[in-house]
Image: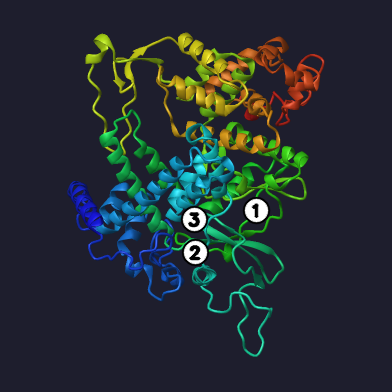
Amino acid sequence: RLVVAVVAAAIAQLLSRHEASSGFAGLGASCRPPSNGRPWCATRSGHSLAGAAGPGAPAHAARRGCSSPRSAASDYPDLEEALRGGFDPDKLRGYFSSRPLELSRRLVEVSRVAWRIYWTWKSEDAADASRRRRGDVLARGLENLGPAFVKVGQTLAQRPDLVGEEAAEALKVLQISALPFSDQEAFTIIREDLGYRGPLADASTGSRNGAKRSLLRSISNGPVAAASLGQVYRATTHDGLEVAIKVQRPGVARQLALDWLTITFLIGVYRKFIPGPNDFTVLVDEAARNMLMELDYHNEARNMDEFARRHASVPFVRVPRWLPELTGPPGTARVLTTEWIHGRRISQLPLHLGRRAVRMAVQACVMQLLLTGFVHADPHEGNLLYTPDDRLAFLDFGLMDRVEPKVMEGFADGIQGVVAGDWLRVTKAMQAVGFVPTPPLRIEPRRGKLASVPLPKPPPPGVPRAPPKPGGGDERGVYFECGIDELAAAVGAQMRSEKGGDSRFSAMAAGLEKLSWRYVMLTPSYIVLATRTFMTLEGLAEKVDPGFNIYAAAMPAALRRALAPRTPQARRALRDAVLTDVGRVRWAQLEDLLVGTQSEVDRVGSVRAAWRAIGGGDVNASGSPAEPGTPAAIGDGDDLGLG
C-alpha cells in the first residue's frame, strides 16, 4: 500500500502538469474507478471504440453491462468521451489524471508480473530444456495482464531476432487462444446489442404455448475460440445457416486505454535513465490506435466487404460474409456475426497440404502488398483456414493497412533486386520507399573531434524526431552524407555475411538492424507492415518447408507490379523501356527487365511464355499483343498504366 501511495503521488504530480497544459483539467472529475479490481474484465462496461450511443441510436445501444443492471455510461461517462472519435492521447491522459491510484495499482501489478517473468527466465538459464517452465510463465503472465500485453506477445512471437527462438516459440500460443470470459457475460452482451429480450437459443423453432421464439436455433456451450479482444461462438440460425458470433470482451476499451498509459509511463521512466535514439512511445501510440480501431465491428465489416471485392479475381482466397441483422448497432457494436467457415489451420494439415496452404498464403499476402494495396495486417496462423474446397480463408479484418502505389512499386523493385543479387537496385528501392534517407547518411562514432558535437535535444514524448540530415546525429554518432554506391556495397556485404541473406526476410531484417548502427535507417509504418507480414509468412513456411524462399515465391507478383505501374514516373519508364513508338514490344529490353528471374523464365519455357504466365496475354509473331483490348494485354493502358 505504501508503494502504491508513493507511486500514485508521483503520477498525480506528473499528470497534473500535463493536465494544466493540455486544457483537460476538469475531465472526468466525477467518475469512479472500478471497485472489484479485476485486471481483465475489471469494469462492467463493454464499450466499443465509438463510445456512448448518440442521439437517435437504438435504445438498447445505451444499455451496457455484463451481469450488472448498472450502465457503463453512468459509471464512466468521460471515458466514452475520451474514446469517442478515435485514439486521442491528450484526452486519455486527462481522463486518468484524476485517477492516479488506478494507474499506480496497474503499474505495480505490471511490475510484479514482469519481475516474476524475469526472475524465472534467468533462474532457468542452466536448466535442461525439457524441465524449463519459463516459456509458459512468460505466455501466461502476458495473458493475465490483458489484451494490450497479449498483442505485444503476439507480435514478439514473430520476432525471434529480438526475443530469441525459445521465447518466440512460447509466445505463439497467444496467437491461437486466450483466456475466455464467462458465457453469461457473453450472452448478456449478445441480447443487449441485438435488442432481443427473448431466449437466445432454444430447442423450439417457433412459438409454443405463448413462448417467444428464440433468437437462434442453437449456440455452442462455451466459445469455440477466444482472443485478446473477444471470443467466438458457433451458432445456427433458424434458416439453417451456420454462423460465427464474435463478442467483444467486457471492459476491453478501458483496459486498453489504461495499459496504453501504463506502458507509456514506463517508457518515459526508461528513457529518463537509459537514453537512446528510439522513441518507443510513437510505436506504442500506433499500437493503441490500432487496437482501439479493432473494437469498431462495423469498420471490420466494411473491411471484410472491401477485401472480398478487391480479391474477387483470386480464386483460392475465401472471405466470410457478415450478417447485418445479427450485428450490433453502428458505433457501439459489441457483436459481429459472420458465416461459419469450415477449415483447418496450417499446423493441422498433412505436410503436402501444409505446403500448399503456405504457398497460397504467401501469394495472397504478396498480392496484397504489391498489387491490391489493401493488406490484412495480421496474417498469423489463427487467422488463416485451409478449406475443404482447396481455398484459403482469411479471418479477422479488424485491422487492415493500405499501401500507396509508389511503395508497392518500390517493394516489387526491391524483391527483384534481391533475387538478382543487385544490391544497388535493392538500396535504391529502399530509398524510394523511405527506408533510407535522401541523401544516404553514414554514422561516425563520437570519437576525437566528434566527441564534442552536442547531442540533439530529444523531442517530447509521442512526437517523432525531425528528419535526419548531415551534421545531425544521435547517441550512435554524427551523421555524414555518403553516396548510394557506398551504402549499396555495405548492404551487399552485410547480406552476404548473413545466413540466408538472399532468401530469408528475417535474415535481411537482422542484417539491416546491424547496419543501422553504421548508416541511418528509417522506419515508416509501411516498412513495419512489410516486415511483420513477411516474417509472419516465413514463420508459417518454416513449419512445413524449411527451404522456402520467400523472395522467389514473391517474384510473379513483383513482375506483375513492375509491368503494371501505377505512378506516372514508373509508367513513362516502362513504356520507354519495353515499347516502340508504335506500341510493339521490345523483347530484348523486356528480357533485360526480367534479368535475375531466369528460373521463372526457364520454368515456363521462354520470355514470351513468362509474359503470359504473369498475365500478359498472348502475342503474335510481330511482337504485338494478340488481344489489345483484354485487361491482361500490354495494350490495355488502364490496366498496365502504359496509355
Where is residue 630? Give x, y as percent.
Answer: 73, 31
Residue found 79% across the figure and 14% down from its top: 622
Residue 515 locus on image (x, y percent) = 45, 19
Residue type at tag 2: Pro
Image quarter hosting the N terminus? bottom left
Q: Distance between the residues labelled 3 and 1?
A: 19 Å
Name the residue at 30% across, 20% down.
473
What crowding class fits label 2: few (fewer than 14 Cα within 10 Å), some (14-19), or many (20 or more)? Answer: many
Q: Nearer the viewer, mark 2 or mark 1?
A: 1
Three-letter code for the amino acid on which mark 3 is drawn: Leu
Mark 3 Cα-neighbour bin, 10 Å: few <14, some 14–19, many ≥20: many
Residue under pointer 3: 229
- The secondary element bearing badge 2 is classed as loop
Label 1: few (<14), some (14–19) or many (≥20) C-alpha neighbours in 10 Å: many
Give coordinates of residue 77: x percent, y percent: 32, 64
Residue 207, x across and y down, in percent: 66, 84
CB under 8 Å between callouts 3 and 1? no
Instruction: Name the one closer to the observer, 634 or 320.
Output: 320
x 49%, y 64%: residue: 329
Q: Name above or below for residue 469 compared with residue 385.
A: above
Task: Name the outermost residue toward the bottom.
Answer: 209
**In whole angstroms, how far apart are the C-alphas of marks 2 and 1?**
20 Å
The residue that label 2 is drawn on is 329
Q: Nearer the N terminus, badge 2 or badge 1?
A: 1
Q: Nearer the viewer, mark 3 or mark 1?
A: 3
Q: What residue is shown with label 1?
A: 320
